[in-house]
Amino acid sequence: MYRMGPVPRRGAVRRGGRRFPARESPLTDSRNGSAHGSAHGVTLVLGGGGARGLAHLGVLKVLEEEAIPVRAIVGNSAGAIMAASWLQHADARSAIRHVLSFQHSQAFRRLGLSFRPTRQLRGRPPSFLRRILSGWRSHVAMHLLFRRASLFHRRRLEILVGAAVRPGRLEQLRLPLWVVALDLRSGEPVVLGSGDLHTVLTAAASVAGFFPPVAHEGRLLIDSGLADNLPVLAARERVGGPIVAVNLSCDLDDRCEPGMTGIEALLRGEELASRWNNRQRAGLAEVRVEPRLGSRYWLDFSDPESIVAAGETAARAALDAIRRLVPEPAAPSGAAPAATQPASPLH
């Protein structure tokens, strides 16, 4: 069972210079637009995955281009960050340009958070630890992990979140966004629908061991990836269906060599547990979108354009199934056909 934060009061939605009250958002059917109702549109579930999360922007771009209405988004970690960035921009293309410009900037490189896999030595694949901590001395990193709260200071993650998302309130975004984190004290996932945007997103992306937990409203929050990296159940409870889930963990890194260290075996076990968990959650959604990202590690931000493109490709492959979830509403009996206009339900 998920612990739910308070149901937020949504502000008015602005579109084309006109303001729509929250109960009459152009993205929902005001006649049955309750949190658990059957409002027109799909509920998106965007899973975590670090650098892989850029694929979500590609998915959103395709949904925009194909006029697929979205009623709400539930996400954790990178999924929540990319959703918030998209909701603050006029369209997905603008969000993509904004995020990728930072990925290619000196400011991003100075953060030291992008690690490409190390080269193979004498034909052998790099170890798990070397791939994770490329550019670091492994024994130094382990020393830091055992003596500090995390490998990286929280400020690095805050800068990353702040570059993708402007300051604001979660409940004031143009669509409902529910962010899932894990409470270290209770051990339960927590679904947040209101609060300071940067604080909530930083908490939801604080990968245990890599970034310190975030104290928020009496809880100690971290990335929920190990417990629930694809929060389909939270979406079903908080919003309802039909659900389109974007799973970033469908590909398994098979570079597993004998003689790995204990910490490498531990990390491998966590990777397998998260992937298995994602597969179970994805099976509960009406439609799954699965970008093919190969063995890309979550801190490998190299060639970000290819990650976005993988999301686009996966969304187009699932497009027919997604369209079947949102049939055209029937015209009232005796009504004259409406003039055809370009649909733009996502912004």
Image (tube, helix red, strand yellow):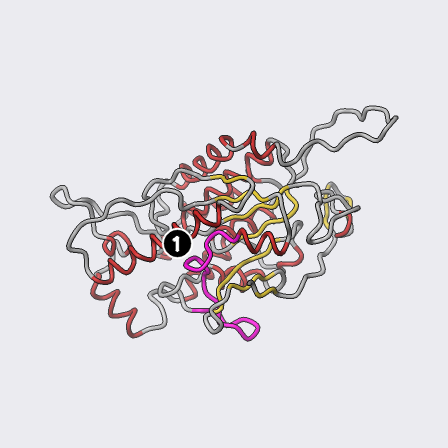
Counting from the top left corner in percent of width and height, residue 164 is at 51, 52
Residue nearest the viewer, comparing 25 with 235 = 235
Quadrant where the image shows the N terminus: bottom right
- Helix, strand or loop at label 1? It is helix
Q: Looking at the rendering, in which quadrant would you find the C terminus?
A: top right
Q: Is residue 216 left or right of residue 257?
A: right
Q: Mark 1 points at which residue?
A: 274
Q: Residue at x 24, y 58 (%)?
A: 264
Q: Which amino acid does label 1 sit on?
A: Ser
Q: Residue at x 68, y 38 (%)?
A: 345
Q: Where is residue 228 in the image (x, y as percent from the top left)?
A: 46, 57
Where residue 303 appears, as percent x and y from the top left, is 37, 40
Asked whether 283 or 102 is in front, the reply is 283
Label 1 neighbour load within 10 Å: few <14, some 14-19, many 20+: some
| Residue 293 occupies quadrant | top left
Q: Does the magenta stretch include residue 215?
A: yes
Q: Give the range drawn in magenta.
A: 213-231
Residue 246 position, x and y percent, is: 49, 44
Q: In the picture provided, is 72 more to the left or to the right than 221?
A: right
* Residue furthest out toward the right: 334
- Write the residue at 40% across / 61% down: 207
